[in-house]
Image (cartoon, rainbow, N blue to C red):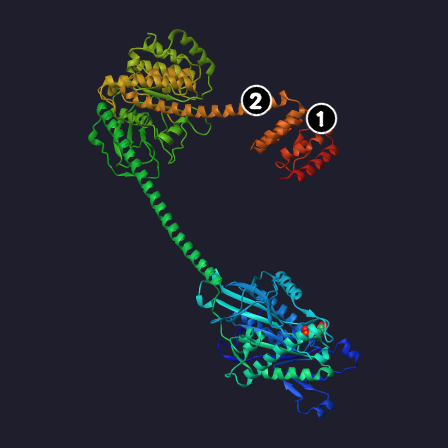
């Protein structure tokens, strides 16, 4: 339904006439039976004429043609009457105009018939209109009264006590304590109309079997306000009423043969209708004179509708029968007067308290929402700022740490270079560290590998692979003799560190994880291992010395697969254990050389020599007590011949793909690796022991005495962690072969401690997870073994409900049912299974569900059907 602009806004505050229509009903059966004829004919849309010529001559004092806004003949429908005029008036209440629709006419002329239809059509259209309106919210209130024998009665109340009429300065006459019901929908309306019909006084007269003996006024109050989406505007808050008035019919006592109660009723009806007629006549003739509204309850209540702030439509109903000619003429006279009456309808912005409260609540809610949004935005901004500040703090801390590491590296390198006799003036550190995408490199470019001289380029230095100290390339001529010819284009010992530290060191141990090594883990969580870069830097320094005499220690790192010769190593370890005893206390006196040879005899997969191991060479050899291989082994040598021997032995036993010549001795030469020979091999030259021993004090240790205490403490910790983590004996042996308590070993010790701490934490986690699984497994076994089948099912049902893991439940059900092949047993128990597993795997077949191997296809289908039925019953 749509309401055109004309329909919705016929004029704000302008006077307009009451819209008057006339409707003639068809002759009824009684009238036809009496051979009565219709006196009236609608000759056009708005003109009705009296067509009985005989009567016309006899009663010439009456006009024979009447013109109204609309006239409807006996073949008209109520829909027509409604649509062609009444609708506009009725629906103007949606726009804030009070409105009223009357049916006026003699008894049995069709007032109730017409008004019933009009009321329903109008309210239906109001519902439709409201449903189409998104920008306004509506509240409908329904009330109904009847005026019976000059008493006002609430038709929605069982209490028949007459209601008082009160005069409100703003609203006019109001009915006190009238029931108003919030109208919800169409069904609700029908219910209320039925109540009204049931309550209304209806009686049988000779004119009408169902004669209305009272005036009925159905009132719909429409309150509307802008919806939340359309914003708020107090001016557009509207409240208006629409009255549907079905008057009782005027009657002649002689015609209705009324007596007693009906006669009294007829008297009240006629009196009130007479007053109504008087009011209408006066309004039409002397609108500014006295209008006797107060002479009847009806006119009092309808005062606004008749001559006040309302749009009004009157449908005058006629009985066409000649027998009712006089009443029809009176009705037409009333209609003639009514059409002259003017009303002045104005938009009612007077709102009810309820609407006002609702509007205020909505406005408050909107403001609160806005406030919340504003505070939310503020909170968000604060959170972002806080987060950024934290990031900045974190970055500053990282920069600080990196700077410290860099300075430490520089100082160490300087000391090494100083010790190696390199002219440090030729090297320049710059502070212009540049973030170059996280890669750092140390290049040693050999221009003439076979000639024994190489031009080393030390390009920056980085401890963690994050940055490069981008100094200008410093060319240092380093005389290095190599034993094996290298490809002339080869760059040797070039290390690049990916930005994310994820570079996997082939020398790394593999204790726990497949995808991350402890070193990677430590790099990630504890920062870089400074020893790696230290080693490289030391190597550079060594190369610069160009003096093989000063090189009394060589660090040799050879990687080999962990799996190689583990058993052999184990055997060797056992042999060693017989002689060596516990690490902490009983060291077997043994010459360094023999110690080295012992170690090398174990077919060590890799060998590394530390710069701090001279004490070992000249003193004790550490014992060992385990049997698992390690990749990195640190040994030491006192002389070049020792080194050469060691390397020869190792190369013969463990290194594959290494040129024998590479390890052969040329007295006084330094061993360096050939990267082309084997990517798993690396030989690094390191600083001389003299360099370290000649007063290299590491930071954090002021005196040898203090360090020795710290060292003892750390050593104990390491041993404890070794035991707790089941660290291979070989690793322990090699570790303490190299780490003897020299202050320069503190870095190695710290690395070891960190690694062990990580390992222990991981092992603890794994152990607790295993314990949990074991406990569960034990429970499963107990369940199957200890109890009878019934007990198992019962326990299992309880347990399974408690278990959160659905897969676990399914596995348990399989366990349960694989114990039997008894189809009947399973069928009977399908309900339990459905409870346990049905909600988990609804598409599984019985075979899959029950773990059966003997079920035929038919049996499976039968089980499945049973199971599904159970499932549907048990679905919760
Ligand atoms: N336009 C019409 N078409 C067909 N039947 C009608 C029409 N108008 C009224 N009637 C029938 O005429 C009879 C009287 O109608 P109704 O009860 O509406 O008259 P009324 O004016 O309300 O009478 P009263 O004043 O006594 O209550 C009813 O049976 C009704 O069905």
Q: Nearer the viewer, residue 744 or 824?
A: 824
Q: What is the quadrant of the C terminus in the image?
A: top right
| Residue highlighted by disc 1 | 821
Q: In which quarter of the image is residue 527?
A: top left
Q: Residue 512: where, in percent of width, then height?
A: 45, 25
Q: In which quarter of the image is residue 824?
A: top right
Q: Residue 563: where, in percent of width, then height?
A: 47, 20
SS state under label 2: helix
SS state under label 1: loop
Q: What is the quadrant of the N terminus in the image?
A: bottom right
Q: Is residue 482 visible?
A: no
The crowd level at tag 1 (other Cα within 10 Å; few <14, some 14-19, many 20+) is some
Q: Which residue is drawn at the image coordinates 71% and 36% (left, top)?
A: 866
Compared across the picture, whether 122 is left or right of 713 comes to right
Q: Residue 683: where, in percent of width, then height?
A: 35, 23
| Residue highlighted by disc 2 | 778
């Amino acid at each position: 339904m749509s309401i055109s602009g004309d329909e919705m806004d016929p004029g704000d505050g302008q006077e307009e006439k009451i819209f008057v229509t006339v409707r003639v009903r068809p002759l009824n059966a009684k009238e036809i039976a009496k051979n009565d004829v219709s006196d009236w004919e609608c000759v056009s849309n708005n003109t009705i004429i009296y067509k009985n010529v005989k009567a016309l001559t006899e009663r010439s004092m009456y006009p024979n043609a009447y013109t109204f806004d609309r006239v409807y003949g006996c073949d008209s429908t109520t829909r027509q009457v409604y649509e062609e005029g009444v609708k506009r008036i009725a629906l103007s209440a949606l726009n804030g105009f009070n409105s009223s629709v009357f049916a006026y006419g003699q008894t049995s002329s069709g007032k109730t018939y017409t008004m019933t239809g009009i009321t329903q059509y109008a309210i239906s259209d109001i519902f439709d209109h409201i449903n189409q309106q998104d920008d306004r919210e509506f509240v409908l209130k329904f009330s109904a009264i009847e005026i019976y024998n000059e008493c006002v009665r609430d038709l929605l109340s069982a209490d028949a006590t007459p209601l008082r009429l009160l005069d409100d300065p703003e609203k006019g006459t109001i009915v006190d304590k009238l029931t108003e019901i919030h109208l919800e929908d169409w069904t609700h309306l029908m219910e209320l109309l039925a109540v009204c019909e049931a309550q209304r006084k209806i009686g049988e007269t000779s004119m009408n079997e169902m004669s209305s003996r009272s005036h009925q006024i159905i009132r719909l109050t429409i309150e509307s306000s802008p919806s939340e989406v359309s914003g708020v505007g107090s001016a557009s808050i509207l409240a208006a009423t629409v009255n549907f008035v079905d008057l009782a019919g005027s009657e002649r006592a002689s015609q209705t043969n009324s007596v007693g109660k009906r006669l009294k009723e007829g008297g009240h009806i006629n009196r009130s209708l007479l007053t109504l007629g008087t009011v209408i006549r006066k309004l039409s003739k002397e609108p500014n004179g006295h209008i006797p509204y107060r002479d009847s309850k009806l006119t009092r209540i309808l005062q606004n509708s008749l001559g006040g702030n309302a749009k009004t439509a009157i449908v005058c109903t006629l009985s066409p029968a000649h027998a009712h000619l006089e009443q029809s003429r009176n009705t037409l006279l009333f209609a003639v007067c009514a059409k002259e009456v003017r009303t002045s309808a104005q938009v009612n912005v007077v709102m009810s308290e309820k609407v006002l409260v609702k509007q205020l609540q909505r406005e408050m809610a909107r403001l609160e929402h806005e406030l919340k949004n504003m505070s939310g935005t503020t909170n968000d901004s604060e959170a972002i700022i806080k987060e950024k500040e934290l990031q900045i703090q974190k970055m500053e801390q990282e920069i600080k740490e990196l700077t410290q590491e860099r300075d430490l590296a520089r100082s160490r390198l300087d000391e090494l270079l100083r010790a190696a006799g390199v002219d440090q003036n030729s090297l320049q550190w710059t502070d212009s560290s540049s973030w170059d995408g996280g890669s750092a490199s140390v290049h040693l470019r050999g221009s003439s590998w076979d000639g024994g001289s190489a031009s080393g380029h030390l390009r920056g230095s980085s401890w963690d692979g994050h940055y490069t100290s981008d100094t200008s390339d410093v060319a240092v001529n380093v005389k290095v003799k190599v034993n094996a010819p290298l490809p002339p284009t080869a760059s040797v010992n070039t290390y690049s560190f990916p930005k994310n530290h994820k570079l996997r060191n082939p020398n790394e141990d593999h204790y726990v994880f497949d995808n991350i090594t402890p070193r990677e883990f430590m790099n990630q969580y504890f920062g870089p291992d400074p020893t790696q870069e230290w080693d490289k830097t030391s190597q550079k320094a060594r190369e610069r010395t160009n003096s093989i005499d000063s090189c009394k220690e060589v660090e040799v790192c050879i990687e080999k697969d962990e799996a190689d010769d583990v058993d052999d190593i184990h055997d060797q370890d056992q042999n060693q254990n017989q002689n060596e005893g516990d690490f902490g206390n009983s060291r077997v006196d043994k010459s360094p050389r023999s110690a080295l040879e012992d170690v090398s005899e174990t077919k060590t997969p890799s060998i590394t020599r530390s710069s701090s191991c001279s004490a070992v060479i000249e003193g004790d050899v550490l014992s060992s007590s385990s049997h698992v291989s390690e990749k990195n082994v640190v040994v030491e040598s006192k002389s070049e011949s020792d080194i050469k021997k060691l390397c020869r032995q190792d190369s013969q036993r463990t290194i594959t793909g290494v040129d024998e010549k590479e390890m052969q001795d040329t007295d006084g030469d330094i061993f360096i690796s050939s990267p082309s020979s084997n990517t798993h091999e690396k030989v690094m030259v390191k600083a001389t022991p003299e360099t370290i021993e000649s007063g290299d004090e590491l930071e954090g240790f002021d005196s040898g005495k203090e360090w020795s205490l710290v060292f003892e403490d750390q050593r104990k910790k390491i041993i404890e962690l070794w035991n707790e983590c089941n660290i291979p004996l070989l690793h322990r042996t090699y570790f303490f072969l190299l780490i003897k308590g020299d202050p320069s070993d503190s870095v190695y010790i710290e690395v070891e401690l960190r690694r062990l701490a990580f390992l222990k934490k991981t092992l603890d986690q794994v152990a607790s997870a295993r314990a949990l699984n074991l406990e569960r497994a034990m429970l499963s076994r107990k369940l199957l073994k200890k109890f009878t089948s019934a007990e198992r099912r019962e326990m299992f049902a309880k347990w399974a409900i408690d278990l959160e893991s659905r897969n676990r439940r399914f596995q348990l059900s399989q366990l349960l049912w694989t114990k039997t092949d008894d189809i009947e047993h399973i069928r009977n128990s399908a309900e339990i299974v459905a409870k346990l597993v049905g909600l988990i795997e609804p598409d599984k077949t019985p075979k899959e569900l029950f773990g059966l191997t003997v079920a035929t296809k038919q049996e499976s289908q039968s089980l499945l059907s049973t199971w599904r039925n159970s499932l549907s019953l048990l679905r919760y």
